[in-house]
Each structure stands twice: as C-alpha cells, then as structure tokens.
Image (cartoon, grey):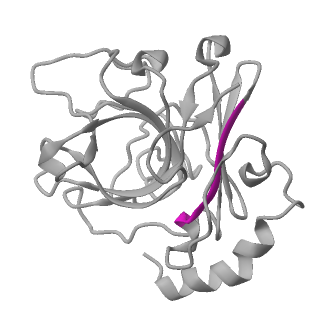
Amino acid sequence: MKTLAIATILIFCTGSAFADASHKSHAVNQEGAVVSPADGSKIAAFDILAAHVHRKGRTVTFHMTTNGLAGSEVPSPTGSLGGATVLSYVWPTSLDPSTVGFEGNTGILALVATSHPDFDDTPLYDEDGDGDPANDGTKWHSHWVVLAPTAACGEGALAVRDIPEGQSPAMPATWPGLPIFIDSPGFTPLFDGPEVKINVSFADAEAIAGASYDGVTAALKVNANVHAPLLCVTDVFDVASGDLSLPGKLK
C-alpha cells in the first residue's frame, strides 16, 4: 500500500480543495447525505466525508466523498490467494439480499467497490480491456456482497457470508462461483477526485424506496488457508455514521 506520508499530503493538497461547492454532484454536497468529519489521522483516500444514495427511475447512484483522492490506494500484492488483501468502499444497506438475487434473510446486503491484485473475481468482465478477463483484480470493480457476523474472524467481526459445503443457496445470475455470497454485476466504479460513484440498475426501483444505507471504508483479507471463513473484514478505516446505524434514506 502507498505510504501514510503520501496519504497525509493528499489531505492538505487535495481533500480541502475537492470537498467544496464546485463539486455540486458529490455526496458531500447532497441533502440528506450521511456526513462524517475529516480526520487527519486516517488515510485520506479512506477518510469519509459523506456517503449518499439517490435514484432516478431505475438507476440508483451510490456515491461517497473522501478527504483525499478516492481510489488512489490499492493493496500491495502478496503473490497468493491465501492472505490476499482487499481494499474497499462499502455501502451497507437495509435491503434484503433477495433484492438482487441472493437467498433471503441471510445478512447485510452491501454494494462495494474493491481492488485486490492477487485474484480476479469478475470472470465475465475485462476491466483493463486487454482481452484477458482473468487478470483485472487490481482495477477497481463492483460487487454485491452479503455480510454476516462471523466469530472465526474475531470478536464482533463481519465476513462475506460463506456457502457451506453441500449447500446451494440462491445466487444472482452473475455470481462468480466462489463459495461465498458475492455477485459480480459489472457496474463500473467511477472516480472524480475525492469521489467514488457506482450507478446501479434495478428491475423495480420502487421496490427499494425507503431503504436505509451507510458508508464504510475497510480492508478484508482472504483466509490464509483459503477456507471458511473465506473473506473476513480485518480493518475498518471509517464509518460515515460512526456506528453503522444506516441513517441514510433512499428516497
């Protein structure tokens, strides 16, 4: 990962300049956004200033403003899947996982933008356009995941929900085949200075009206044994609400 010194420079050289009225479409300038104070002790690219979700017809925009250059930090490769690090921008929601095709009542449905150079979990998409869809893990990409409390990851820790051997819960059509509750829908994360944004389409946007949301930046890690639990949340850099209370409302 890039050094904290570089991240600190970003706080002063970019963060204060980006989070202003000249970026009217950014989350930090939206009415009803979940706002969070700047914290110079945090890595600027993951220091959340605001998270917001809004919709127009069937398209729902998830966006987040940070105190630095969003997407500028990516994990250092480890050379193997076991122990690999995943960096992420996360929008936890109150939506039932069945909304996007998972088995219902199985945990917290969250949209994430992630980067992880040691593996590629979007087999249907070629993010870097080089003709090989299996070498794009470093490129920021999107997932739907279902998060669940998982004692094996640590006290009070969350993990992407595992699929136990021999079970076949409902999965979205674009599930990448991993033994966890993850979908690779192909929605491209868009970056604009301090802002990360994902536009998502729903078959029936009215069905999600009134949903609650929050914003989180976090690191996850693949179990060294590549076994259940497969993917644990290991570090939470920032939570927009401060307590994961999902105070944002999708109108």
At 28% from the left edge and 45% from the top edge, which residue is drawn? 158
The x, y position of residue 227, in whole percent, is: 12, 44
Which quadrant of the view contains residue 30?
Answer: top right
Rendered location of residue 111, percent (x, y): 50, 37
Q: Which residues are magenta?
A: 46-54
Q: Position of residue 231 (x, y in %)?
A: 25, 47
- Residue visible at 53% across and 44% down in the picture: 126
Residue 53 magenta? yes
In this rendering, position of residue 22 left or right of residue 149: right
Q: Nearer the viewer, residue 167 or 68?
A: 68
Image quarter of the C terminus: top right
- Image quarter in which the N terminus is found: bottom left
37 or 98, which lies in front?
Answer: 37
**Vertical order, 216 against 170 (above or below):** below
Q: Residue at x 19, y 41 (%)?
A: 150
Q: Is residue 219 left or right of residue 187?
A: left
Q: Looking at the picture, does residue 53 appear above or below residue 138?
A: above
Q: Is residue 87 visible?
A: no
User: Where does residue 124 sit, x and y in percent of width and height?
Assistant: 47, 33
Residue 200 quadrant: top right
Question: Between residues 170 and 104, which one lies in front from this camera angle?
Answer: 104
Q: Residue sitting at 66 percent across and 42 percent down?
A: 52
